[in-house]
Image (tube, helix red, strand yellow):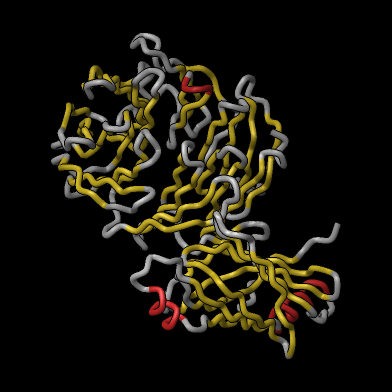
Amino acid sequence: MNKRVPMRGSVVFLSVLAVAALVSGCNLPKHGSILFDIDLEPLEAAYGALKGDIPAITGATVTLFQDEADTIVQDLAVSGGHATGTVNDLAEGYWHVKVDVYSGAAKIFTGEQDVNVIAGLVVNATILFDPVVENPETGSIAFEVGLNPVPGYRFLDQAANTVLYSAVRDEIYFYDAEQCLIAVHNGETFNRVRDIEMPQAPRALCLAADGNTFVLGYTTGQVYSLGVDTGEFTLLGDALMDVRMLAAITPDCVLAVGPGSSSGSALKTFNTATGQILASQSVFYSFQDIVYNTGTNTAYAFTTGVSPADLYRIKLDPATGAILEAKDSRYHGDYNFGAPVRLIRGGQRVATSSGNMFSCTALTDTDITYAGNIGQTYADLAADDALGYLSLVTLAATGAPAKLIIVRQDNFFVVATVDLPGKPKSVINTAANVVVTVEFNGQYYAKAFSKAFLGL
């Protein structure tokens, strides 16, 4: 199952230049055709290696999806070890392409991928097939297909250095620093719908509090906005420091974290509407992760280098951006902490990767009070406050695989576990799914587990 068998085919767009010329300057949707030509022999050999016999592939069907467009289903002609056919009238942008391969009436392989159709170009795409378990405007696409080394997971065809989610838009954002792009996926269907490009990879990245704009921080101190819908890249101002972390406070305010003058960290609140630095303060600790709690108007940061690690609280006035207090916890290393830090129970507690939890209150004397242990360490955690569950991904231990663990928030009892391949990188809670991203052999894969499947 883990053997990847590359198989090359070609998909050639016909009349691309003619179509583009016909519609230029008239604001009409541009359409064209895709010609599929996929070599099936390596799949037959791979199936034979898995099952012990080599089937005759007799049919293949392609299904193409795009938001606000009719689903296209078309059979390919199978002859001479190739599956061929033409899909006409495709608009530009991302199409979710699904290919099902049949031997007689039995579907033996299925594969899918999101492919960006670009006018006048041959775009390389990879479709990895899973064995089926019984019981541009127009442009060109060249497919490389093979067996999926991570069955059931979607090959992302990019890095996932940071994964963000906008609840107001129900969209997942996979940030690839090397390619300087953010891939946008629908939170319900998990289909890739578009890419947002940027001219330079930022040092820090967050979603604004309204969920409609990215805020990007650079080592130069400059802070930019990036429109989720428009992709517009706009200079907001200068934080006058190397911006290493960002936390959204209000739709017009972010907390920026940079290095201190000699050690520790510098904190600055920054108005994204005016470009003005609202407040600044230096602290002795170096921050590794930060999360903002709107319920207590407090940012909680994991710090290292002192005690040997701790949680730090930064009390803010969201109306003015004033930093009211910056203070470490009372414990000074008495407990294990660890990044990432995540808010749970609707912001009543802050969790650390060690599993230790701490209360969140507006009062200095009771804030960051030890409140027990979840019972699991985690590589990432996502809270579902609507249904009352936590989704945790854990790293592999000796003799045990990595896991997705679903825990009730009221008593922290485990209600479901799923073994995971590779190294978990993130978990995101959407309205309909729990989306897990893993790294496997240096490549990134993701799977949307439906909450119905998990029993939530």
Task: Name the residue at 46% across, 22% down.
Answer: 347
Task: Name the residue at 67% across, 70% down.
Answer: 62
**Residue closest to the eye, 59 or 404:** 59
Q: Residue furthest bottom?
A: 80
The N terminus - image quarter? bottom right
Q: Is residue 152 above or below residue 375?
A: below
The image shows residue 326 at horizontal and vertical percentages of 26, 21
The C terminus - image quarter? top right
Q: Is residue 243 above or below residue 43?
A: above
**Residue closest to the eye, 255 or 367:** 255
The image shows residue 47 at horizontal and vertical percentages of 76, 75
Q: Is residue 37 above or below residue 239?
A: below
Task: Name the residue at 22% across, 44% down.
Answer: 223
Q: Quadrant of residue 296?
A: top left
The image shows residue 132 at horizontal and vertical percentages of 77, 64
Task: Name the residue at 72% across, 76% down.
Answer: 46
Q: How many numbered discs? A: 0
Q: Residue furthest front?
A: 26
Q: Is residue 402 above or below residue 263?
A: below
The image shows residue 325 at horizontal and vertical percentages of 25, 18
Q: Quadrant of residue 85?
A: bottom right
**Residue closest to the eye, 149 or 196:** 196
User: Can residue 267 be spotted in the picture?
Assistant: no
Looking at the image, residue 304 sits to the left or right of residue 261; the answer is right
User: Can residue 25 be spotted in the picture?
Assistant: yes
